Amino acid sequence: MKKVIKRAVLDNSIALTIVYTVGHIIIAALCNYFITGARWDLATLDAVVEPCINGVWFYILHKIYKKYKSNSY
């Protein structure tokens, strides 16, 4: 069962991207709120927009990495 879950998350670009993006949103909202003192609604808006852009970037990078990794063996 552990192998199935590990393979489903680590070998799947979408699953890995979603986990990364959700974690990033939570961390970014809390950091923005506590570090800058921004209102919670603005901290959350910033925390949603920026990680979504990063999530797309990460997805592209992971797809490229997998392509080159599979070609190197």
Image (spheres, grey):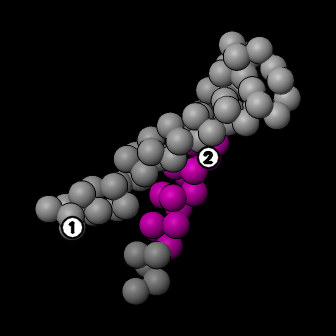
In the displayed structure, 54 sits above or below 73; it is above
* Residue 25, disc: none
- Identify the residue at image location x=58%, y=34%: 26
Q: Nearer the viewer, residue 31 or 6?
A: 31
Q: Nearer the viewer, residue 44 or 14?
A: 44
Span colored in magenta:
54-68
Is residue 55 depicted above or below 49 in this figure?
below
User: Residue at image x 44%, y 41%?
Assistant: 18
Q: Is residue 66 visible?
A: yes
Q: Earlier in the sequence, mark 1 or mark 2?
A: 1
Looking at the picture, tell me which residue is in the foreground, 26 or 58: 26
Identified at 75% across, 26% down, the residue is 33
Q: Exactly how many numbered labels are in the figure?
A: 2
Q: Which mark is residue 3?
A: 1
Label disc, if present, on residue 57 of the rendered structure: 2
At x 52%, y 66%, the residue is: 65
| Residue 29 shown left or right of residue 60 in the figure | right
| Residue 57 is inside the magenta segment | yes
How dense is the environment of label 2, judged by Cα within 10 Å: few (below 14), some, or many (20 and up)?
A: few
Q: Determine the CA span between mark 1 and mark 2.
A: 27 Å
Where 53 sits versus 4, above or below?
above
Kind of residue at badge 2: Trp
Q: Indicate the position of residue 56 as horizontal and vertical percent values.
A: 57, 41
